[in-house]
Image (cartoon, grey):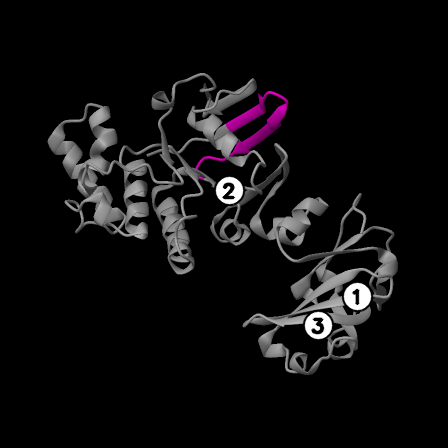
Amino acid sequence: MKSLAITIESVRKAYGSYVALDDVSLDIQAGEFLTLLGPSGSGKTTLLMALAGFVRPDAGKLLLGDRDITRLPPNKRDIGIVFQNYALFPHMNVLANVAYPLFLRKMPRAEARQRALDTLARVQLDGLAERNIAALSGGQRQRVALARAIVFEPRVMLMDEPLSALDKNLRETMQYEIRRLHDDLGITTIYVTHDQREALIMSDRIAVMNCGRIQQIDTPQRIYDRPSTRFVAEFMGEANIVAPGSVRRIDSAEASGETLMVRAESFHLDAKLVGRDGIVLEGTLRAKAFRGENWLLTLTLDGGQDVLVCIPAALAGGCAGLATGQRVTAYAPATKVHPLPGASA
């Protein structure tokens, strides 16, 4: 099975005065796992549905390989889809659900049955072929939906928040299962989620969307460590956006007039104990919270800005004894300080 590249060229979609997609362009490599990440209303699901054929763009072009699929019906696109609610047929058993796309393609019944059984084994459901859908757990239903999406060997897979209905532990297990399946099959995959951690764990690249536009597209590490906009910085985690005048630089850290982004977990509490070359913030402890694996401190700087400082529990021996109103010094190494041109603190 040969995967295909996808090209999205200047796609626009509006519903009356509401612009869901605003001149979106994106190149997705063959075999890539790309995640569309953003808050509700950012346009990520609209873009996925346009690729699936359920939403027709007002302008722009969608290419699957070198084939223009912009106006092609959904069933002619050779695309597997896993929906948020799985969309399984409750009156069919597991095997019939998985074989259904093959029956639509007029595959002989015996061949379709064997292909469906082989696909169920691939998603670790080989003992449940005759089980009724209503008798399955949430995780098992998810695997059935995955099997049905890949059974006809599509060259592109679209996934719309497929894990949102699962509990935390099962969700994390399925994240690795979906990524493993992608790596085994090599299918070009576009995955929609609003969960930042999920996107970081699963993706080759992430496209962060907001207000119908792509804010940044890059690898998970660069999206997290080197955001290009304030929106991306704050959406991807606990980010502090501070003016250069709010920090004290030490050693070889170069002075800059740009606004700075520092992740909460990049700080240490005592600058004297850490290798120099970085920045120091001094403020008053306004609040603290123990979160199991770490302590989250809120410091109010002298200029009035609040800053989040996250200290791992293993290094936070003194955090429990800190009192609100106490003066606290926080240090971050220069390698963890990222300029945000054009942003304001």
Does 246 sit left or right of 265 as displayed? right
Determine whether the residue tagged by mark 3 lies in a helix, strand or loop.
loop
In the image, the segment drawn in magenta is: 7-31
Determine whether the residue tagged by mark 2 lies in a helix, strand or loop.
strand
Residue under label 2? 35
Front: mark 3 or 1: 1
Q: Residue at x 28, y 38 (%)?
A: 88
Residue 103 location (% of width, % of height): 20, 27
Residue under label 1? 300
Residue 14 within the segment the image draws in magenta: yes
**Real-space Cα distance between discs 2 and 1?**
36 Å
Nearest to N terminus: mark 2 or mark 1:
2
Which mark is drawn over residue 187? none
Residue 228 appears in which quarter of the rendering? top right
**Real-space Cα distance between discs 3 and 1?**
16 Å
The one nearer the camera, 19 or 197, is 19
Residue under label 3? 268
Does 236 sit left or right of 69 as displayed? right
Q: How many numbered markers are drawn? A: 3
Residue 119 location (% of width, % of height): 24, 42
Quadrant location, the N terminus: top left
